[in-house]
Image (cartoon, rainbow, N blue to C red):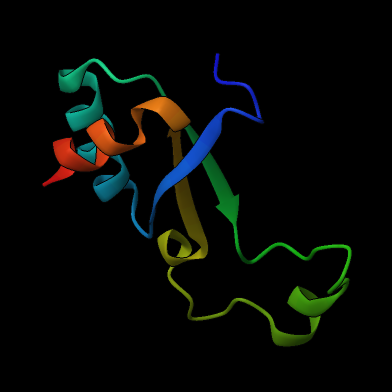
Amino acid sequence: MISLFQRRELTVCLTQARSDEVCAKLDQAGIEYQVKARDRSSPSVFAAGSRERSGSFGQAPAANWTYTIYVRADDLDRARASLR
């Protein structure tokens, strides 16, 4: 488990396939990571009701998600090198 204060953002992926590729490379390098998936279409506290106004007709469901991958601060340089 990576604590909130020890983690650093490695990358943000717009597709699940790319997120899976990054995670596979981190696994091969033996680097611990966390993935946070966010639904960009769901309203937030700051934009309550935004989805109801704009709707989601015609939007690709897969395009509504982002995947943020975090690693330990100590492993950030190794993780960046493993993605090259």
Residue 68 in the image: above or below residue 43 = above
Q: Out of 28 and 16, give the one closest to the viewer.
A: 28
Q: Is residue 72 visible?
A: no
Q: Out of 19 and 28, give the one closest to the viewer.
A: 28
Q: Out of 80 and 55, give the one closest to the viewer.
A: 80
Question: Quick check: 41 left or right of 80?
Answer: right
Residue farthest along the left direction in this orientation? 84
Question: Quick check: 39 left or right of 33?
Answer: right
Q: Is residue 6 visible?
A: yes
Query: Can you tell which quarter of the image residue 12 is in?
Result: bottom left
Give the residue at x 17% y 21%.
29
Q: Position of residue 39 (x, y in %)?
A: 60, 55
Residue 68 in the image: above or below residue 64 = above
Quadrant into which the N terminus falls: top right
Question: Quick check: 77 left or right of 28?
Answer: right
Q: Position of residue 17 (x, y in %)?
A: 25, 47
Q: Position of residue 83 (x, y in %)?
A: 17, 43
Give the residue at x 60% y 64%.
40
Q: Position of residue 78 (x, y in %)?
A: 24, 31
